[in-house]
Amino acid sequence: MEESMEEEEGGSYEAMMDDQNHNNWEAAVDGFRQPPPPPPPPSSIPAPAREPPAGQLLTMPAVSVDRKGPKEGLPMGPPPPPEANGVIMMLKSCDAAAAVAKAAPAPTPSSTININTSTSKFLMNVITIEDYKSTYWPKLDGAIDQLLTQSPGDYIPISYEQIYSCVYKCVCQQHSEQMYSDLIKKITNHLERVSKELQASPPDLYIERFNLALGQYMGALQSIVPLFIYMNKFYIETKLNRDLKDDLIKLFTEHVAEKHIYSLMPLLLEAQSTPFQVTPSTMANIVKGLYTLRPEVTSPGRELGMSWLITARQHVQVPEGTDSECIECALLLETRTHWSCRDCTQSTARSCRHSGAPSQSCSWKRMLDFLHWFVIKKKKPNKQKQNKKIVAARLGDDFEMGQSSNEFIYRFREEQAA
Amino acid sequence: MSAEEMVQIRLEDRCYPVSKRKLIEQSDYFRALYRSGMREALSPEAGGPEVQQLRGLSAPGLRLVLDFINAGGAREGWLLGRRGEPGGGGEEEEDMDEVSLLSELVEAASFLQVTSLLRLLLSQVRLTNCLELYRLAQVYGLPDLQEACLRFMAVHFHEVLCKPQFHLLGSSPPAPGDVSLKQRLREARMTGTPVLVALGDFLGGPLAPHPYQGEPPSMLRYEEMTERWFPLANNLPPDLVNVRGYGSAILDNYLFIVGGYRITSQEISAAHSYNPSTNEWLQVASMNQKRSNFKLVAVNSKLYAIGGQAVSNVECYNPEQDAWNFMAPLPNPLAEFSACECQGKIYVIGGYTTRDRNMNILQYCPAADLWTLFETCDVHIRKQQMVSVEETIYIVGGCLHELGPTRRGSQSEDMLTVQSYNTATRQWLYLKENTSKSGLNLTCALHNDGIYIMSRDVTLSTSLEHRVFLKYNIFNDSWEAFRRFPAFGHNLLVSSLYLPNKAET
């Protein structure tokens, strides 16, 4: 026992950092070798049997110091020269002192600490960065892939417990930073691929596909975010002061929504002009999704958008044929009563044939406002900036609403192409 | 209640039933699990699992956490582990269990993210578990708990510092640019309000500035705004009452009182420290040598006990080991000398050797453990007090005797003077004198912008006129006299400590 303890001590002190005086190591060892330490309570000598036989034992003989113990009258000469068996000496003096300590009024409780973390099965094996790269991340990578590509509502065969444990281990073994960057990289790649696929889709499928991509991504986040809550709570929230869900939503905004909003909005407008080309629910989903992408929305953006959303929902709820006038008013651009948006906004109540329901041109205006807000809100100092400015100017107050929406859309597309 | 949906949690080969509602309420793990739509989120009828399988956790830790969840969260008086009646001591085996149980509990609570349980741990930090909890907080990324442990360890700094485990915690190198745990705690101790504290065997009675009820207090603090002294809620430990000629020094905002002699003229070696953060006295390791009328000096986070009555040896106290070690001795035993720390070195000035006046200034370098003759001066001084600010040593009081041709009148031998000695330029300055006061029996402390001096001349019968409470302002070289002397008494010591900011009761 004595031998093994000596080994432990040497090993642990070698691992110990030196202080600025470079005397920590020596001082610490001297402390055990020179005059007898104050009598520790008998409980302070740990039972080595409790320690697992792992190689990286760090547990110290817990010489917990009884500071109340009787200490007067320990006259000592000059210290003996350091000896190789200093630890043994110390133990002997501990034994001798143990009897004294028993008589002490209140023995302090033992304070053995399992400095080696090996009581935990999770942390018993050190995960090196190579382990992380070869074993742990691939496991997560596969699960994320599966979650990103399945349809919402599908049965997910992945075990939450297994993936969560995997994340947990990596966080506890200080791989949060790497894992976070891997996750962001992975999802960014995925979204770039999604964006490219969208770009390649024919216009008649574009809206539906955008809706699908959005829905699939949001559905995947429903699972991905909970899987990474440990990393979120103990790394992203505390160290980066951010939130994983926000970060992942932002990725979609940056890599998909913003790239496609210019193509999407005119198509949405066009779709409105063609009855039932796009189902109202798709429309509602897309608008709702676009709102999710901008969680920091404040008025007037939110008000505008929300009212548009409500309008869209109303339309969804109206059963076909029950109020033909309402549907007509809401969806069919052909039946518009007045086309000039300026007039419309100036006298919304009067201009709508149904006092309660908003006119289609109002909702159209709101949609443009929404687009306006969506584009303007994001300030990105890159080459797109100039283009955006033009769009913003077109959509701003100075924009003349032309004679027909098609003209606007035409111009809009031209600008896009340029 | 009986219809509550129960979930079976399996760990290894055992199942633990828990209320699903409570589980979702208390554990972020299960809340997220049921929200994730993944395999385990489905009910057994819909193809989900019969039991919720957990792996890797320890059974006792999980059981504790599930008990907590089943009990519906935090309860009044919830205590960590098994805690018997206070003072019961508990069996060794239980204590061991408690510590290892702690890490299992924290692991299970972290894994399952039972935040209310983790929050509860903040109030459970103890001397026996603070290091372990600190380590666990680092491992599992619990910043609040880490903060709570740091606060606790700063308050109980020396008790924590001398635990062997403390050095192991420091073994993982802090991130670049990060200070070590020791340094952080040391800095945390130097917060609060600097307050002048007076210790002594004060006498009660109607003449005392404050008619204290019952026993007069032995520890007072000075409130500068109202210029009044108030008793501290603690008194000198009984061991220290009527001990004279002790050494005192402040180390890490602990006031150490070491050695001295009892009225029965026994010298002692005991050492005590007062911790203002807890308002408690602790007995620490005794010196190897009994000594009195010596000097105790704090340098580089260690204490040095220098000389004493017919003693030339020097001992060093390291709070990290709570032990005294002999160092290089003084060249000669000295009497009526003084010493102080100045820029990491110890300077010893004045007094008598066994056969002559000590005219030498000695310098001790702790790193080299070496005494050197720094300079020989032509003024003899004894029984002075010394403090230092940067490279300047202030020599307060004492009895001067000039041997050179420029000697002053003999009255200088018994008056309160302040001189400075610059260790860089080796220049002496005679700063200020206060002719009506005696400089022989005083205590002083560096506090804020000045040296606060208390003197009580016991040789004269009209003692009232010779009790002095003065401040020497070192920046504008001026005296300031205060009216309120703490109390009648002997054996006065004044020092400056950081007291916790909360109002002292």
Image (cartoon, coloured by chain):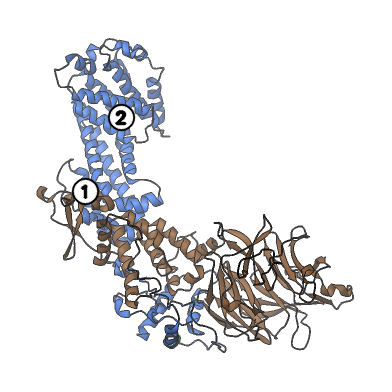
- Label 2 to label 1, Cα distance in Å? 34 Å
Provide residue B429's location: percent of width, then percent of height.
80, 67
Q: Secondary structure at mark 1?
A: helix
Image point 62% across, 72% down: which residue? B249
Is B147 positioned to the left or the right of A204 in the image? right
Quarter holding residue A217: top left
- Sort mark 1 into few (<14), some (14-19) or many (20+) by Cα contacts within 10 Å: some
Callout 2: chain: A
Colour assigned to chain B in the rendering is brown
Pick the residue in front: A269 or B109.
B109
* Residue type marked 1: Tyr
Provide residue B218's location: percent of width, then percent of height.
62, 70
The vertical placement of B309 against A305, above or below, is below
Q: Which chain is blue?
A: A
Provide residue B496's location: percent of width, then percent of height.
64, 65
The vertical placement of A304 against B279, above or below, is above
* The label number, if any, that marks residue A261 in the structure image: 2
Residue that label 1 marks: B34
